[in-house]
Every structure is written in C-alpha cells, then in structure tokens.
Image (cartoon, helix red, strand yellow):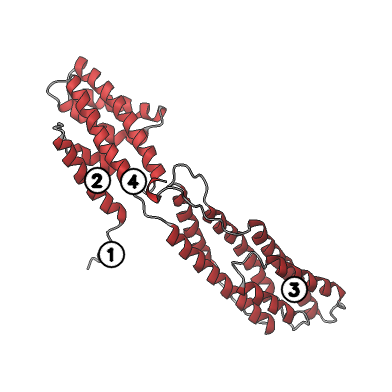
Amino acid sequence: MMRLNPYRIGFRTIKTAVGMALGIIIAKLMGLDNFASSAILVVLCIKHTKVHSLQAIISRFVSCILILVIGSIAFSYFGQSAIILGVIVLLFIPLTVVFKVQEGVVTSCVILLHVFNAKVIDIHLFINEILLLIVGLGIAFLMNLIMPSLDFKLKQYKEEIENQFTKIFETFSTTCKAPNPSLDMSFNQLQLTIQKAKSIAFRDVKNHFVRNENSYYHYFDMREEQLELLERMSKMIQNIETKDTLLTKISSLFLEVAHNVNSNDYTVLRLHSLYEIKIELEQLELPNTHASFRTRASIKQLLNELEEYLEVKSQFGSLKLHKDTKSTIFS
C-alpha cells in the first residue's frame, strides 16, 4: 500500500497562495489581457530568501523584456508560426546565458506565447505585457519581503550544540576518573546538527539586503572546528590505560569547561589551570612501565588538544548579535 508523505503548510506556501490571488485580482482590475499569467510570475519568483528573490526578479524582468522585443520583431516580420516560435526559443536561450539571466527562461516563454497568440502586435500589447510583469514581479517581491525571523531557530541550535558539548566534557571528566579504553563516542549527529545550523545561518544572511555576514555562522563554524578537537581528545582518552596522578586534576578541568561551554570570561582561567597542569606534568618523574608511558603520552597530547580548543574559543570571543534598526520585514 502506498504511504503518503506527511506535509505541513509552510510560510512559503501561504505566501505563494496569497500572492497568486492578489496578482490575478490586481491584473484583472487593471483590465490587462492574459491577467491570469501574473499568478505564474508570482509562483516563479517566490524564493526562500529576500536576496535570491530580488536576483530572480531582476533576471526575469530583463529576460522578459528581451523576449518581448525579439518576439514582437520576429513575429511581425516572419509571421506567428510554430516554426518561428521554435527558432526564437532556440536562439533566445543561449542569449540569456550570455546575459546571465537564464533563470528567466520559463517566465520569458510565458510572455512569448502571449505575443504568439496576439491578434495584433502593437504598442498596446507591449504595454500590457510590461504591466503584467510589474504586477506579477512586484507582488512576488512584496511577498518575499515578509520573511519569518530565523533568530529563534538559530538560538535553539546554539543551545542544543552547547548542551551536547557539555555532555561530551562531562563524559571526558568521568572517564579520566575511571579510565575506560573501550570508550566509544560518536560525534556524527552533532556534526550534522552543526551543518544544519550553518545552513540556516547562511540563509539568514540572504534575508538581508545590507548585511553580508552573520555572527551565528561564524559561531557555528567555530564550534565545528572545536568538534574536530573533541574527536581527537576522545581518541587520546581512549588511550589512557592506567591511573595517573594528574588525571584527577584533568577531570576537574574538564568539568569546569563543561559548566562554562558558552562563557568566554572563564576561558583565560581555564587556560591558566591548564598551564599549571602542563608545568606539573613536566616536573613528574618518567613512568616505569610501558602502559604508564603510553598513558602519560596520551595525557600530554590531550592537554595540547584542550589548549587548542580553549584558544579557538578565546579568539572567537562572544557571539555578537546583529541589532536591526529597522523592522525585520524590511531589513
């Protein structure tokens, strides 16, 4: 039996439906021919972000003006036949690539068919098609200005990632107290979460015309870099085979880091504690067994990885959120 996919009506779907209705109503009230085509223009220009929407609208407007001029001239001289229509499309598509407006090919074909079906090709037809473009593309632009804020979702991802980091450091702390060579930690899900968060942060950038960067994106990028260090630390902890006098202090340090994952104020203090442990490590006598030697080597490498982890956070600083001076809709 065929299973149906669950579907939730999203904000983009609502905007598309409202935009189509508005396009038809306005074009009909203006007395335009082929007024229903304004709805097609709206559908083709509703995008996920404001920047992509504006780029699509400009591309479609330019390509439609091109096809309107080319189609009007060609049909006036050679007649409105299917062969001429095919030749126009054949030559027009490479032209859109040259002008980098190929995104408007489908929209242009709609306008071309209007010219093809027109009883008379004159200035009235030209004005009618331009007004159709203005109505359809204009409504699409207005609909795309209404974008839901992604700040709440970005904040959720931030908190989720930080909670996962806290759990990882708590596990590290526990394992240092009771070495467990069979420790097996998976970071795949956390890596996927960070990738999703970066994708949404990048989309948020594209929802603003005057902002070309996003603090959240840099934040998630920093966490991704730290995650690589956590994976390396996990392997070092797995190599700890015997108890060592420093493991208790390292365990406490991991616990402090776990409780201050998001705090930049305490990073310098953690680094100070780390350096104290490294100095003490250098002053200890060399291990007398092979297993103890491997453990000591793993501890040294572990501390180096932790130092790099803390320095990455220290260099990033704190997450600086962009404060819009205008409404979210028009930013």
Amino acid type of disc 2? Gly
Q: Residue at x 69, y 61 (%)?
A: 311
Q: Quadrant of residue 175?
A: bottom right
Separation (CA) of disc 2 from disc 1: 24 Å
Pointer 2 or 4: first along the chain: 2
User: Which label number is shown at residue 144?
Assistant: 4
Separation (CA) of disc 3 from disc 4: 54 Å
Amino acid type of disc 1? Pro
The residue labelled by disc 3 is 299
Q: Quadrant of residue 281?
A: bottom right
Pointer 1 or 4: first along the chain: 1
Separation (CA) of disc 2 from disc 4: 10 Å
Q: Residues within 10 Å of mark 3 (few under 14, many from 20)?
A: many
Picture coordinates of residue 159, whole percent (x, y)? 50, 67
User: Which label number is shown at residue 19?
Assistant: 2
Q: Nearer the viewer, mark 3 or mark 2?
A: 2
Front residue of 263 and 179: 263
Q: Residues within 10 Å of mark 2 (few under 14, many from 20)?
A: many
Picture coordinates of residue 167, whole percent (x, y)? 57, 75
In the image, is residue 301 above or below residue 209?
A: below
Which residue is the extreme one toward the left?
119
Amino acid type of disc 4? Asn
Q: How many marks?
A: 4
Pointer 3 or 4: first along the chain: 4
Which residue is the extreme one toward the front?
325
User: Which label number is shown at residue 237?
Assistant: none
Could you tell me which secondary element the residue under label 3 belongs to? Answer: helix
Pointer 2 or 1: first along the chain: 1
